[in-house]
Amino acid sequence: MRRVLILLGMLSWVQASANEVGVSTGIEFPQPLTLGVQYKTDALPAWDAFYKVGFFDFPFSNGSRAVSIYSMEVGARYHPLLNGFYVAGQLGFRKIGVTVDISNLKQDGVSLASTATASLGTVYTGILLGHEWRLSPRLSLAVDAGIQFALIHSGGITITMDPGQDDGTDNSVSDQKEMRRISGLPLPQIAVLRLVWYI
């Protein structure tokens, strides 16, 4: 009997201090696929913290054309009405790379270069509005939308010389100013679908 009382006491303590950890996966823009975790505690019922990472690499043909994007975000969601509606703030890093085939660029019938790769790196902050619906005690579905603002950003273009060219060929591109401007543009962020499994 004493053991049963101790066990019931422990269960009630665990329930009183219940925390929730959720594992999430989402289809989003600009990061197509994300994986993350989120944490809720009864001590702060209106808040939950989250961390997400994403990676997407899509080659079009034998590696000469490709798009890649990876990102990571950390932030918090505030539920002002203590229901599914939330306002979120976040801090993140995103890197985008685009590789194109420029072997058709020729001079006197000789290719000048094989590929050009544009890369954009951005440290950003963002604000979002969203809603999370509990489908079951362990499973929920969420959507949100907002905007990302660049804090630190840079970019550049790298041109790979065609193997048939002499080593002295100048393939440099004066693009730093333009690519930096592009990497600093605000971007919309939309979570079309995010599933959360609470463990």
Image (cartoon, helix red, strand yellow):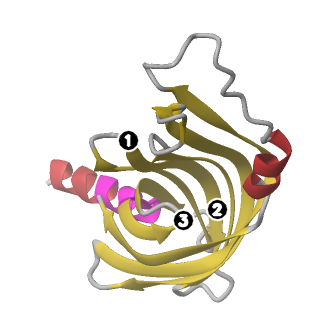
Query: 2 and 22: which one is in front?
Result: 22
State the residue position of label 2.
Answer: 76
Q: Which residues are magenta?
A: 10-23
Point out the image quarter for the N terminus. bottom left
Residue at 40% from the left image edge and 48% from the top image edge? 66
Q: Farthest residue in the left direction? A: 1
| Residue 83 higher or lower than 178, as above or below | below
Residue 87 in view of the camera = no
Determine which residue is flagged by label 1.
64
Measuring from the top left, give residue 52's x and y in whole percent. 49, 53
The quarter of the picture where the C terminus appears is bottom left
For residue 168: magenta? no
Q: Return the residue nearer the eye: 170 or 30.
A: 170
At label 3, which amino acid type do we have? Answer: Pro
Q: What amino acid type should be assigned to the residue bearing mark 1? A: Ser
Task: Point out which mark residue 30 bears.
Answer: 3
Label 3 neighbour load within 10 Å: few <14, some 14-19, many 20+: some
Spatial CA distance of label 1 from label 3 is: 22 Å
Contact? badges 2 and 3 (CB < 8 Å): no
* Position of 85 relative to 93 (above/below): below
Element under disc 3: loop
Q: Disc 2 to disc 1, how far (Cα)?
A: 39 Å
Q: Position of residue 25 (x, y in %)?
A: 35, 62
Q: Residues within 10 Å of mark 1 (few under 14, many from 20)?
A: some
Mark 2 vs 3, N-terminal side? 3
Q: Is residue 70 visible?
A: yes
Q: Position of residue 116 (x, y in %)?
A: 54, 39
- Left or right: residue 69 versus residue 182 is left
Q: Residue at x 75, y 57 (%)?
A: 182
Q: Secondary structure at mark 2?
A: strand
Give the mark nearer the N terminus: 1 vs 3: 3
